[in-house]
Image (cartoon, grey):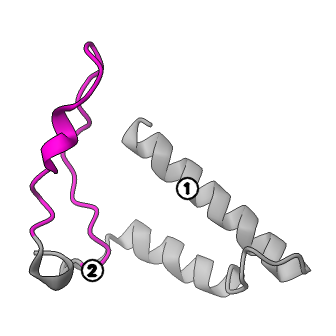
Amino acid sequence: MGHYGRVVASPPEHADARPPGLPSPPPGFLDAASGQPLHPAAREAWIAAVGDGWADPRRLYREARRARMLLDAARESVATALGA
């Protein structure tokens, strides 16, 4: 169960509306409100991000630019891990 009791493990109805020949994504559980403990690598990355990337990444001051670089790198890492 995810936010507000919604089941998140089931794909939405439009999930099969993929172009022909495109492989299905691997199954995964990406619920941020999950009751599961963090993987040790995820915990380490989160602690580092909180320490270094605490600023608002939409701003222009030095700490915010650092936060933006960390956020962009994290997004790229997740996309690579998911094969996107």
Helix, strand or loop at label 1? It is helix
Query: Could you tell whether 43 is left or right of 22 in the image?
Result: right
Q: Amino acid at mark 1?
A: Arg
Q: Considering only vertical position in the picture, is 11 above or below 19? A: below
Contact check, label 2 and label 1, Cβ < 8 Å: no
| Image spot of residue 9 (x, y percent) | 12, 59
Q: Is residue 50 magenta?
A: no
Give how far across and how far down residue 83 sits, in percent: 41, 35
- Mark earlier in primary sequence (2, 1): 2
Main SS class of the magenta portion in the image:
loop
Q: In the image, what residue type sits under mark 2? A: Ala
Q: Which residue is mark 1?
A: 75
Neighbours of disc 1 within 10 Å: few (<14), some (14-19), many (20+): few
Q: Quadrant of residue 71?
A: bottom right
Horizontal and vertical percent position of residue 4: 16, 84
Q: Which residues are magenta?
A: 7-33
Q: Please state the horizontal and vertical placement of residue 36, each as a whole percent of the image.
A: 19, 77
In the displayed structure, does residue 32 sit left or right of residue 48? left
- For the point 42% across and 69% down, the residue is 42
Q: Secondary structure at mark 2?
A: loop
**Front-most of 1 and 29?**
1
- Relative side of 10 to 84, left or right: left
Work out whether residue 15 or residue 63 is closer to the camera in this orientation and state it.
15
Label disc, if present, on residue 33 of the rendered structure: 2
